[in-house]
Image (cartoon, helix red, strand yellow):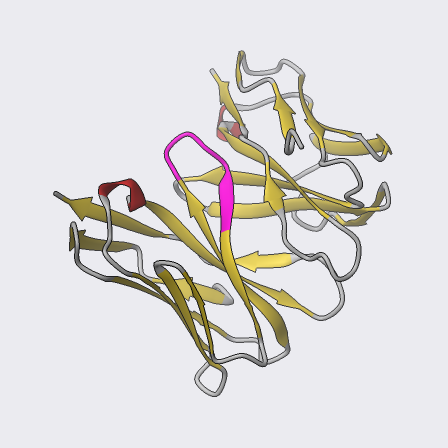
Amino acid sequence: GEDVEQSLFLSVREGDSSVINCTYTDSSSTYLYWYKQEPGAGLQLLTYIFSNMDMKQDQRLTVLLNKKDKHLSLRIADTQTGDSAIYFCAEKRGAGNMLTFGGGTRLMVKP
Amino acid sequence: DAGVIQSPRHEVTEMGQEVTLRCKPISGHNSLFWYRQTMMRGLELLIYFNNNVPIDDSGMPEDRFSAKMPNASFSTLKIQPSEPRDSAVYFCASSGAAGFHEQYFGPGTRLTVT
């Protein structure tokens, strides 16, 4: 199975909060990332968190990391239709630059 | 900065033809990655270069696929001969030296093999 797992789909109403979840298996992960992919485009880095942090906030985005449970989440406050996209979590292990990506969660925001 | 540049953006070719995808990483970045994205398999890492040297090519599907990085500002991914199952979006990404770990993705090349 995949080392990084995400649910496939999430639907929310405009203005609500969205929470996208991710689980990973490697306890040696040093950085964890969230990327956004809009239709027809490449992946865009949204934010990342270092493994010794529990939380990181950046405007409408809040990342929570539970290292014990190997669980990462991305909360988007006041979700807008422009937030509709596929969201990928990824982990970096060790000193190398390779990332392991999850399968992506498609977020649909209904007006 | 212009970001990661890929060409062509779209490629349609017939089965058996050679296909070459091109990538220019962000200036100063020393790691380059080729990914393939399909509905069935998601995002797959094909090959990873560091300082122009291939580090991990375990994701390259078969011998029909080859990648080169002749210098720090250019890489190619070649498929010869191409097959319909190679149809996918191919992304190139680059990242900087140690301590600068984020990967920046290009817009992708959508390949259709008929």
For the point 17% across and 58% down, the residue is A16
- Is residue A3 toward the left or the right of residue B94 in the image? left
- Is residue A25 toward the left or the right of residue B94 in the image? left
Q: Main secondary structure of the magenta part?
A: loop
- Is residue B23 toward the left or the right of residue B107 in the image? right
- Foreground residue among A27 and A80: A80
On the image, the x and y values in percent for residue B50 come to 81, 48
- Foreground residue among B56 and A34: A34
Confirm whether the magenta stretch covers residue A19.
no
- Foreground residue among B17 and A12: A12
On the image, the x and y values in percent for residue B16 come to 61, 15
Magenta-highlighted residues: A38-45
Visible residue check, residue A33: no
* Residue furthest out toward the front: A59
For the point 54% across and 79% down, the residue is A53
For the point 53% across and 62% down, the residue is A48
On the image, the x and y values in percent for residue B114 come to 47, 15
Location of the C terminus of chain A by quadrant is top left
On the image, the x and y values in percent for residue A32 come to 54, 66
For the point 23% across and 42% down, the residue is A81
Q: Is residue A92 above or below residue B76?
A: below
